[in-house]
Image (spheres, rainbow, N blue to C red):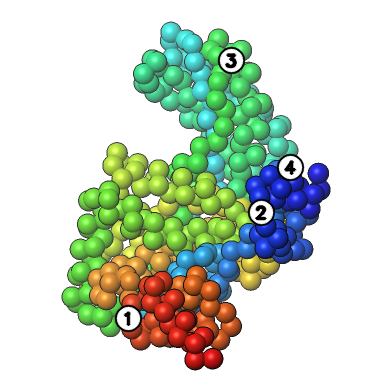
Amino acid sequence: MTPAARLQAVARQAGLGNEAIDSLSAAAEGQIELADRLVENAISAMAIPVGVATNMIVDGREVLVPMATEESSVVAAVCNAAKRCRGTGGFFTSGSGPVMAAQIQLLGVSDPENVRLKVYERFEEIRTICDETDPLLVKFGGGFRDLEVRVIETDEGSMTIVHIIVDTRDAMGANAVNSMAEALAPKLAEWTGARTLLRILTNLADRRVVRARAVWPLGEIGGVQVRDDMLSAYRFADADPYRAATHNKGIMNGVSAVVLATGNDTRAIEAGAHAFAARTGRYRSMSRWEKDAEGNLVGILEMPMAVGLIGGATKVHPTAQANLKLLGVQTADALARVIVAIGLAQNFAAMRALATTGIQKGHMALHAQNVALMVGAVGDEIDLVASELKVLGKVRQDLAEDILKRIRGGQ
């Protein structure tokens, strides 16, 4: 079926009315052909608002950062946090390079340690197989880099796990490393006598780590007490997984918004980030916070960041391409550094809000327009309802309904 015919068939089966059909059809206007190429059974597209984070200085460069998110206050928080550290140079970053790993699972042997050494002995042959699988990647300076073989204990006994380490250049790298793993698996079985099972990348990209740091002067924070309360909030998150989950979600509010805006894989980044946060054996804060010799607040964020500029939606989606042009980055590494800097800014903003007025004051003020929309306000009514909610200091749907009725009654 064409997407239009598919929509009509779905509407009949689900009992959708004309209003729902029109909404789904309008949402995909100009994008339905692309949507039909990207996913199966496409009937529509869903637009996510794209806001622009300002005030960001990353490694000495002024940068505008597109953020795709439906959550109020996320973009504003980054703008505010970035403004407060401009005087100290903004954000400084470093990275370990665009290196990804794929895993090949070897089963059914009584001598897994012996198998481990047999694999290492084939290092150069493994390099050849991997590089021949993706000669274009090799042409651009990437390709096989290293080998890691581990024996792990499981409920069904020992398994030998082979990691192939690959430089993926400006690609995220999933397709490249997966293809190499699948090409290599039959040879590993032949060399070792083991049965190969899973052969796929790991999203715990701990060889592709990006680091960002920034310094916020006391005057920009609100004084010693606010600084110390923010440090206490960090220590709470680092010690308690219940708090860490929300603390880290705040970081990912910023990270995922830029990942999505550039057409990269939000699920892969989130999986890797949270696994990295638990690498010590317990789930902890992704960020670290300290005070320097002058008493200023120092924030540090270090996390896996497997993003790319080529392949997938990043390359074919026109909005992603426009957002990358807005960012002005030329390499995947440069994109990754901006993303981690955004995550650190987001974390600062959330912790400062929690340590001062509480998270709801600023968030709900920005959320007021959403609530106005929820109760059916249109046009000028949206701002009128939102303004009254802000004056009341209570952003609630029932109050918004009453305000809207009164506004319309006065008309």
Between marks 4 and 2, how big is the CA–CA gap?
Answer: 48 Å
Q: Is residue 31 above or below residue 39?
A: below
* Pointers 3 and 4 in contact (C-beta within 8 Å): no
Between marks 1 and 4, how big is the CA–CA gap?
Answer: 59 Å
Image quadrant holding the C terminus, namely: bottom right
Say few, some or many: other residues with alpha carbon within 10 Å of mark 2 (under 14 / 14 to 19 / 20 or more): few
Say few, some or many: other residues with alpha carbon within 10 Å of mark 3 (under 14 / 14 to 19 / 20 or more): some
Amino acid type for the residue under numbered disc 3:
Ala
Residue tagged by mark 1? Answer: 393
* Nearest-to-viewer mark from 1 and 3: 1
Between marks 3 and 4, how big is the CA–CA gap?
Answer: 27 Å
Q: Residue at x 51, y 26 (%)?
A: 162
Q: Which mark is residue 16?
A: 2
Mark 2 secondary-structure assignment: loop
Q: Residue at x 48, y 59 (%)?
A: 255
Upstream in sequence: badge 1 or badge 3: 3
Amino acid type for the residue under numbered disc 2:
Leu
Residue tagged by mark 4? Answer: 136
* Nearest-to-viewer mark from 2 and 3: 2
Say few, some or many: other residues with alpha carbon within 10 Å of mark 4 (under 14 / 14 to 19 / 20 or more): few
